Amino acid sequence: MEELIEKLRELREKAYMGGGPKKIEVQHAKGKLTVRERLELLVDPETFVEMGSFVLPRATDFGMDKMRFYGDGVITGYGKIDGRLVFIYAQDFTVIGGSLGEMHALKIVRTIESALKVGVPVIGLYDSGGARIQEGVASLEGFGKVFAANVKASGVIPQIAVILGPCAGGATYSPALMDFVIMVKETSYMFVTGPRVVKATTGEDVTFEELGGAEVHATKSGVAHFIAENEEEAFVILKKLLSYLPPNNMSEPPIVETEDPAEREVPELEKIVPVDPMSAYDVREVICKILDDEEFLEVHENFAPNIVVGFGRLGGRTVGVVANQPAHLAGSIDIDASDKASRFVRFLDAFNIPIITLVDVPGFLPGVDQEHGGIIRHGAKLLYAYQEATVPKITFVLRKAYGGAYIAMGSKSLGADFVYAWPTAEIAVMGPEGAVRILYKREIAKTKNPEEFVKAVTEEYRRMFANPYKAAELGVIDDVIEPRYTRIIAIKALEALEGKREETPLKKHGNIPL
């Protein structure tokens, strides 16, 4: 027995070392941690249980007989993060470049399936050169099975991808199918076709970082939801994100004790938001002042900055916030903002997280590029997402709310449970001046002082129509409130909606305008 145990220990030590000391040195030289070091940072001490540590690749052709490493380049198992159970798969770049082969894929699929059975989040740590060429179609089939597992888990358990090195080719679609993607500056990148292929096909010279680095995906493509300075910060972001999420779609988000009083008034709001609808301000100041302890985890911070989305708490309950950002494009909704907000709303709805919407929107962004790019189709996604959502939906109209964009931002007509407006709110088909210029086109042309005429009539129009009281008369909003009471009212509304149940028509699924 002693000999057998000693043999086991030797094999386990061999598996633990991955590709060996030299490969580990190379990993460190690139500024990257090893897969074991990553797990030590991420998981609570003494809680990680590894599965499949002795799995070997089945292929032996094309030199694979010399690359039969235990674990086959991916560590899988389960453990606890801040006391909460999660399943994890973590690719090991020191083993055949972390490439995905048949057994590598099998281990990932089993990890996702196990997380589904238990009903807990699954986390993928990506650091891979992509498909294992030596295994040919078996590698491609492995990718397909991973994608299928991601889709099966979608909307049932939270799926979070952390990109800690290369993620290229078909491998990119697994993180893209997951709920959130975290990337690390300068050491992680994602692209379907690399710089060489781009050069060969288009003639463009581009670096790995320029083509698919963290900054690119956080600002331009929208693939990355969070960007970290280093791996340690990536795990801090991951842990904070997890703290807001329920383990699965049948559970409620965790309730956290807070010393921030539910009765706290926020008089500062009356100074943050200017009365003039044309003046800019940072809506994040409003968001933070309303939320518990002024804590807000913004998602997609650098992508489509004209709309702000993220997580916070009200009265200890997790909420998702969607808000127009007047500091960028006056808060108008464009193609990217539509995609960003609609996907976030659908995630919130899937995981029982109430939606708090703050409205200050002049409309959908005009322009030839927007129209030809499909703003109609993309904007429809936001309408669809809000109407489809059955979680508590509470909307506050802070200032301007014009046209179709007003409807898209969690309006009563799209199923908002409660809609409140500040006294500064203007709810109308369009801005007062634009409306006057259309309605009084002939009169303006005849008058000697057209601008003075427009100014005078605009003020009258604003007094009669572009104010919250007209909307309140029609029941479009539930109440006009003082800004300082926004937090108090939001918490009371959440309490009232705690037992909300909403029946939907029987159907397989709808057809969102993708």
Image: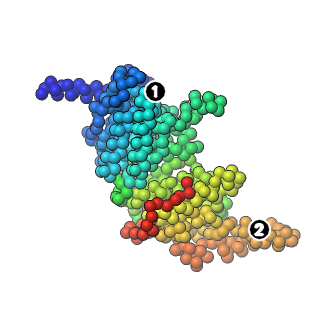
Residue at x 56%, y 44% (from the top left corner): 221
For residue 30, the mark is 1
Residue at x 35%, y 56% (from the top left corner): 254
- Say which element carries label 1: loop
Real-space Cα separation, disc 2 to disc 1, in angstroms:
62 Å
Q: Earlier in the sequence, mark 2 or mark 1?
A: 1
Quarter assignment of residue 13: top left
Q: Which residue is mark 2?
A: 437
In the displayed structure, does residue 334 sit left or right of residue 153?
right
Residue 262 is situated, as x and y percent measured from the top left of the image, at: 41, 65
Whether residue 265 can be seen here: no
Residue 387 is situated, as x and y percent measured from the top left of the image, at: 51, 65
173 to 454, vertically: above or below: above
Whether residue 335 can be seen here: yes
Q: Crowding near pointer 1: few (<14 within 10 Å), some, many (20+)?
A: few
Q: Which quadrant, please, contains the N terminus?
A: top left
- Say which element carries label 2: helix
- Relative to the observer, which residue lies in front, 248 or 478? 248
Residue type (three-letter) at the residue carrying disc 1:
Lys
In the displayed structure, does residue 98 sit left or right of residue 357?
left
Quarter assignment of residue 194: top right
In the displayed structure, does residue 512 sit left or right of residue 104?
right
Residue at x 40%, y 42% (from the top left corner): 145
Outermost residue, bottom side: 473
Q: Which quadrant, please, contains the C terminus?
A: bottom right
Outermost residue, left side: 1
Residue type (three-letter) at the residue carrying disc 2:
Arg
